[in-house]
Amino acid sequence: MHARLSVEDGAAILSLPSTERRLARSSYLVREGEVATTCSLLISGIVYRQKLTGVGARQILSINFRGEAIDFQNVFLGNADHDVRALTSVVVATIPRAPLLSLMKARPGIAHAVLMSVLIEASVFREWIVNVGRRGGEVRVAHFLCEYAWRMDALGLEKNGYELPVTQEQIGDATGLTAVHVNRMLGLLEEKKLIRRERHRFHILDVTGLHEAGDFNSAYLHGQTILGDV
Amino acid sequence: MHARLSVEDGAAILSLPSTERRLARSSYLVREGEVATTCSLLISGIVYRQKLTGVGARQILSINFRGEAIDFQNVFLGNADHDVRALTSVVVATIPRAPLLSLMKARPGIAHAVLMSVLIEASVFREWIVNVGRRGGEVRVAHFLCEYAWRMDALGLEKNGYELPVTQEQIGDATGLTAVHVNRMLGLLEEKKLIRRERHRFHILDVTGLHEAGDFNSAYLHGQTILGDV
DNA sequence: CGCCCGTTTGAAATAATTCAACACCGGTGG
DNA sequence: CCACCGGTGTTGAATTATTTCAAACGGGCG
């Protein structure tokens, strides 16, 4: 939900029939290949999308925070083309296909919001292709951290350093590197005093510096803001 | 336009005000950063999207054929986050923002078709992230060729081998490799009798074999078919 | 306390890039 | 018509980035 919704539209979404579910860390919300005809709104926690290659390598495709809708495409395309998994324990509200479709038909504002959401998501995918395809290891990791921090900022979740509930292996799978190499790249960034790590928390010591190191420009996020409190 | 449109919807699209333009190879249809408020329908020829990194490296993001709409996002997001360029000489019909928006409002079928188009596009981006992030050079190139061939097939353009108006440098920029390495990988695929090259044309000698070599499964294209003759 | 998962570090191996030279082809101008 | 030119393709050798393998370490949790 990346567009300002009217009060009525917001209320209409809330009145949709939905089942709330709590899911443990690393459980699957959606599996690739599955015929999925629902769409979930992430109430709390963090999820990520992934795809596996024929030889079993994993690529993480995106990370999504509370307030974001997961898998609009399943409502429209039917067959899931990737997995969605819980990065932390999460709470999601699952909405069946039919009522969502009729709501979109009845309320153009909501249809518009869905479209905006998908368009911005596509823009982020494009940036990830660039990141993984054409930047060196250090830059990739820095870029990943920048996007992560930027989005958490937008949610107001940044108090006292960023919670970073991802393993280095997961950062690797998101950036197309190995966990070992991610470790070394993080070390480099820390050496340069751009970040500081402690446990599962990290601090950005030099925002501008990290943006430069990560070739990061937030334009591709299109000022993405989240509905937030649903 | 990836959904079957009704006859009336099709007619409505054709009645949109549009300016037809012919553009030479390698000219820009859209530039990153530009405030673009139109959307173009590709009548003939091939275009590609690209983004440049801070150090000037290029990543190609997609290749689009006739019948596909380019840059819906500009109509909705305003600021172009990537370039669109002509791979061959092309003819495009450019539609201004306002009439497209009001048509979408008036005709839910068209709004739906736009959404489908964007969703499928996003699915293809996801697959590209996997390709570039987690597959080896030979597999990447083979995958690229598979997608290319699959889409040309869908358009019925495959008579007597595939026209391949891309340079090896462009294949490299699409797969995150250097032109030199692409050359070697193409050589490998040819050695294995999966493809044959001659001039700007190439033949797939072993479709199944190339699919295997490229870890290719067309599911992510979601049976994408194009309106074709607009 | 001990175990497991994730991190850290080093060294060797591999994949891909870089640099450089040359061949090829189609097109242009003399 | 030919000669030349620029862009593209091809090949080899040296270099670099990243992976792989392996071992040790550390903290949180049962």
Image (cartoon, coloured by chain):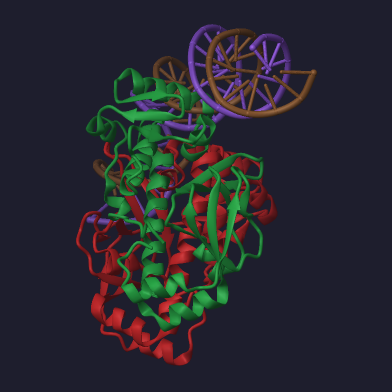
Chain colours: A red, B green, C brown, D purple
The residue at the point 50 percent across, 77 percent down is: B101
Relative height, residue C18 to residue B58 (above, below):
above
Q: Which residue lies furthest to the bottom in this view?
A: A8
Q: How many marks?
A: 0
On the rendered structure, is B110 left or right of B218? right
**Which one is in front, B112 or B173?**
B112
From the top left corner, tell me how far across and down residue A137 is, in percent. Answer: 53, 38
From the top left corner, tell me how far across and down residue A228 is, in percent. Answer: 47, 77
Which of the 4 quarters of the picture holds residue B227? bottom left
The residue at the point 38 percent across, 71 percent down is: B10
Relative height, residue A141 to residue A106 (above, below):
above
From the top left corner, tell me how far across and down residue B181 is, in percent. Answer: 48, 25
**Which one is in front, A224 or A207?**
A224
Which of the 4 quarters of the picture holds residue B105? bottom left
The residue at the point 52 percent across, 65 percent down is: B73
Q: In which quarter of the image is the N terminus of chain A?
A: bottom left
**Which one is in front, A10 or B216?**
B216
Q: Residue furthest left?
A: A35
On the rendered structure, is D17 left or right of D21? right
Residue A218 seen in render = yes
Relative height, residue A105 to residue B160 (above, below):
below
Q: Quadrant of the C terminus of chain A?
A: bottom left
Relative height, residue B44 to residue B185 (above, below):
below
Residue A161 seen in render = no
From the top left corner, tell me how far across and down residue B144 is, in percent. Answer: 39, 38
